[in-house]
Structure formats: structure tokens, C-alpha cells
Image: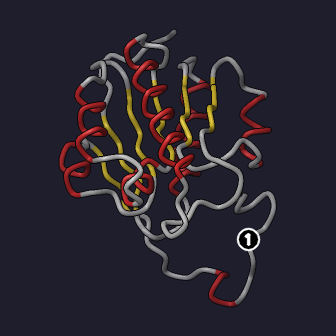
Amino acid sequence: MAGLKCGLVQVYTGDGKGKTTAAFGLALRAAGRGLKVVIVQFLKTADYGEHKALARLTPEIQVKAFGRQGFVRRQGLQPEDYERAREALSFAGEVMLKREADILILDEINVALHFGLLSEEEVLALLETRPPEMELVLTGRGAPERIVAVADLVTEMRPLKHPYSKGVKARKGIEF
């Protein structure tokens, strides 16, 4: 691994579009510089367009999706959702412990927190184990204040205008 001298904690949150996209853009930039990136997806399955593209960048970028089939909503959570969130958190912890990445992206972890699939204490404990040379990126709406407080960089995406308000549905290759 090329390695970083100083890793930071980044949070991409807010109600606007682009949190995962920003994190994946960072992954592409890092891979282009020889850094190893691991992306842990807490609520998504491996059938999004970005998975097909990022598979071409293995081994520089590894994506591990822990979400179940279907759209996970706060109402209607299933026991499987809690199990998968714990598996994802455990996997992320192993990546940190073994120092298997220069950049570790925890995609939609903030939503997993908001849904109660994980506790803030568990995630804060994970952040404390981050090796100082590892960059850690947390994405998803509703980042808790305690997570924001420990982060080094926080970006809030907010919608100014969105085609959904005009009835435009999510488009293959653009939103998924």
C-alpha cells in the first residue's frame, strides 16, 4: 500500500443528493494515487451501477455490501437488518485492525444509526480504534451530533432543487 501519513475522519451527511457519490469520487482519486480503499455498505446490496464499475478497479477498491434485498426503511425493519448492520460494523473493525486499507468508507452508516440498527457508542468505539494513518469516511443522512463532533471534515449536502419534486423517478446510471 502507498499509505497515508495522516488519516482524518470525514462525514458526508444531509438531505441532498451526492453523499455516496462524493465518497466514491474520493475512492477513485485515491485508487489513482495507489491507495487501497475498502467500502463497507451498510444498507445497500451489490446490485447498484457503482458496483459493476468499481469491480474493474479491484484490488485497489474493494466493495462489501451488507444490505438485504429491497429498500430498508425505518418502519418495517427486520431482524436480518440488525444482524447485517452488526456484520458490517464487525467487518469494518477487522479492516481497521488488520490495516487492510488506506481509506475506509462506511457508506450509509449514519442511516443505520438513525434507524437504530447500531448505537452511537458502538460507532464511536470503532472510530477510536482507527489507525492514525487511515482515512475514515462516514456517509448518510442524519449524522448524529457526537459523530460530527469527532470528525475532522463534515460536509452537509442540502437540496436546492431536485427533479423528484417534478415527478422524475430515479434513473438507472444516475441515481442507481
Above or below, 137 relative to 111: above
Can you give x and y, in whole percent of width and height, for residue 36 in the image? 55, 19
Give me the residue at 40% from left, 24% from top.
93
Above or below, 172 relative to 86: below
Quadrant of the rendered structure where residue 6 is? top left
Circle count:
1
Residue sitting farthest toward the bottom = 166
Can you give x and y, in whole percent of width and height, for residue 92 in the image? 45, 28
Who is closer to the viewer here, 125 or 52? 125
Give me the residue at 25% from left, 43% from top.
151
The residue type indicated by label 1 comes to: Ala
Q: How is the image coloured?
A: secondary structure
Tell me if 137 is positioned left or right of 27 in this view.
left
Who is closer to the viewer here, 101 or 4? 101
Above or below, 174 relative to 101: below
Residue corresponding to mark 1: 170
Few, some or many C-alpha atoms within 10 Å of disc 1 (few <14, some 14-19, many ≥20)? few
Can you give x and y, in whole percent of width and height, for residue 140 in the image? 45, 56
Can you give x and y, in whole percent of width and height, for residue 156 in the image? 37, 62
Tell me if 86 is positioned left or right of 153 in this view.
right
Give me the residue at 21% from left, 57% from top.
145
Quarter of the figure that contains the C terminus: bottom right
Who is closer to the viewer here, 108 or 72? 72
Give me the residue at 31% from left, 39% from top.
123
Tell me if 105 is positioned left or right of 148 in this view.
right
Q: For mark 1, give the secondary structure.
A: loop
Above or below, 59 relative to 52: above
